[in-house]
Amino acid sequence: LCCNVVDEFIFACARAGVPLVPGYHGNDQAPEVLLREARKVGFPILVKAALGGGGKGMKIADSEAEFEDALESAQREALSSFGDQRVLLERYVGRPRHIEVQVFADSHGNVVHLFERDCSVQRRHQKI
């Protein structure tokens, strides 16, 4: 369920020309498939809980040698925290900028945005 919603969002962003971090958001969670996809994306890679939030279930593998441990750790934490061990893979970006824009719309066509907010300062993957 989650991965399908994420896939739809990712595909919509790609169609709109939004630059995306390379990754794997597929439903096949076999360890050998995830390793193959990690190799395609390249290291370092971020293993993220599919249903995650708040930095839980996020592990970095700097090399292929670290991938299995990062995967197993992320899956354990995801299962414990969210009841689901599915993961996503994304190229790890060491010093990212995290900018958010809040947009509200109603069924009458009224739309307003609340400008941008720099959320780059984070502690343990939590916005400060």
Image: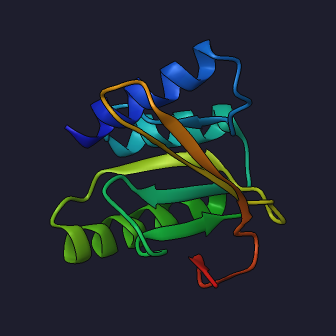
Q: Is residue 63 visible?
A: no
Q: Determine the residue positioned at 48% across, 61% down.
A: 68
Relative image position of residue 72 (x, y in whole percent)? 38, 66
Q: Determine the residue positioned at 59% across, 84% down.
A: 124
Q: Quadrant of residue 44?
A: bottom right
Q: Nearer the viewer, residue 81 or 117?
A: 117
Q: Nearer the viewer, residue 1 or 64?
A: 1
Q: Nearer the viewer, residue 89 or 110?
A: 110
Q: Quadrant of the N terminus?
A: top left
Q: Is residue 127 visible?
A: yes
User: How is this picture coloured?
Assistant: rainbow
86 relative to 21 in the view: left or right: left
Residue lying furthest left: 83
Relative image position of residue 66 (x, y in whole percent)? 61, 65
Relative to 14, does residue 51 appear above or below in the rendering? Answer: below
Residue lying furthest top: 15
Q: Nearer the viewer, residue 113 or 65?
A: 113
Q: Quadrant of the C terminus?
A: bottom right
Q: Quadrant of residue 75?
A: bottom left
Q: Quadrant of residue 39?
A: top right
Relative image position of residue 47 (x, y in whole percent)? 51, 57
97 relative to 117 in the view: left or right: right
Relative to 62, does residue 4 appear above or below in the rendering? Answer: above
Relative image position of residue 94 (x, y in whole percent)? 81, 64
Q: Determine the residue positioned at 41% across, 75% down.
A: 56
Q: Determine the residue positioned at 29% across, 72% down.
A: 76
